[in-house]
Image: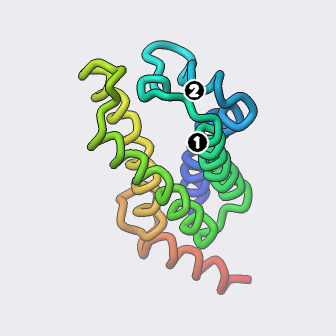
């Protein structure tokens, strides 16, 4: 992978990790506070679907925490294989979350707030999909070498 591609992927992983670690740690350590206050400003997204359930809030937080840790480790140990595994794991959490909200608008939110929430969750799916496309050489980065990421890695390995 070129230095710019590695940097772009690391930045993507750090952004994904930061959000999920923030949500996950908050929900695991203070599930009721997280439920009543997430995302920290109006509209309160989780409380828009009552009732509060400590077990469910803590488990949801653990899912966010796990995907945040996976993304952070991928940023640190970045190789093509690690990145692909991390992104598939991340999407296995983000995609069902997005699909749920598309089909189940929160009764405590306005239509505009539901659309905004769903759009943000859609971005959280699009970013890792684009990152996967970059890794598979299917997304045209202006600085990527011909032959995609795999060819670049193979060239790098054969030069040792």
Residue at the top extreme? 42
- Crowding at dot 2, Cα within 10 Å, few <14 / some 14-19 / many 20+, comes out as many
- Residue 62 seen in the figure: yes
Q: Which residue is mark 2?
A: 35
Left or right position of 23 against 51: right
**Residue 57 spot, x, y in % from top left:** 60, 37
Residue 33 higher or lower than 8, as above or below: above
Rendered residue at 24%/22% (across/down): 111
**Nearer to me, 84 or 44:** 44
Q: Are marks 2 and 1 in contact (CB under 8 Å)?
A: no
Q: Which mark is residue 24?
A: none
Label 2 residue SS: helix
**Nearer to me, 67 or 141:** 67
- Residue 14 seen in the figure: no
Where residue 53 sits, quadrant-wise, is top right
**Nearer to me, 33 or 90:** 33
Rendered residue at 35%/46% (across/down): 100
Rendered residue at 57%/68% (across/down): 85
Q: CA distance from mark 2 to mark 1?
A: 10 Å
Label 1 residue SS: helix
Comparing marks 2 and 1, which lies closer to the viewer? 1
- Crowding at dot 1, Cα within 10 Å, few <14 / some 14-19 / many 20+, comes out as few
Q: Quadrant of the C terminus?
A: bottom right
Rendered residue at 59%/75% (across/down): 153
Q: Which residue is mark 1?
A: 56
Residue 125 higher or lower than 33, as above or below: below
Q: Compare marks 2 and 1 and give the one earlier in the sequence.
A: 2
**Residue 77 spot, x, y in % from top left:** 72, 61
**Residue 25 spot, x, y in % from top left:** 71, 36
Q: Quadrant of the N terminus?
A: bottom right
In the rendered picture of this protein, how many numbered marks are placed on residues?
A: 2
**Nearer to me, 104 or 97:** 104
């Amino acid at each position: 992978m070129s230095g710019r591609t590695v940097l772009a992927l690391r930045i993507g992983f750090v952004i994904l990790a930061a959000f999920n670690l923030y949500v996950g740690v908050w929900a695991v350590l203070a599930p009721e506070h997280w439920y009543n206050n997430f995302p920290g400003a109006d509209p309160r997204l989780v409380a828009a679907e009552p009732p509060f359930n400590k077990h469910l809030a803590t488990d949801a937080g653990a899912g966010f925490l796990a995907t945040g840790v996976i993304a952070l480790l991928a940023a640190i140990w970045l190789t093509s294989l690690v990145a692909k595994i991390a992104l598939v794991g991340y999407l296995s959490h983000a995609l069902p979350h997005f699909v749920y909200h598309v089909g189940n608008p929160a009764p405590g939110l306005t239509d505009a707030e539901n659309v905004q929430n769903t759009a943000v969750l859609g971005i959280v799916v699009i970013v890792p999909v684009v990152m996967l496309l970059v890794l598979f050489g299917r997304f045209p980065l202006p600085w990527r070498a011909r032959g995609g990421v795999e060819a670049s890695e193979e060239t790098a390995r054969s030069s040792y």
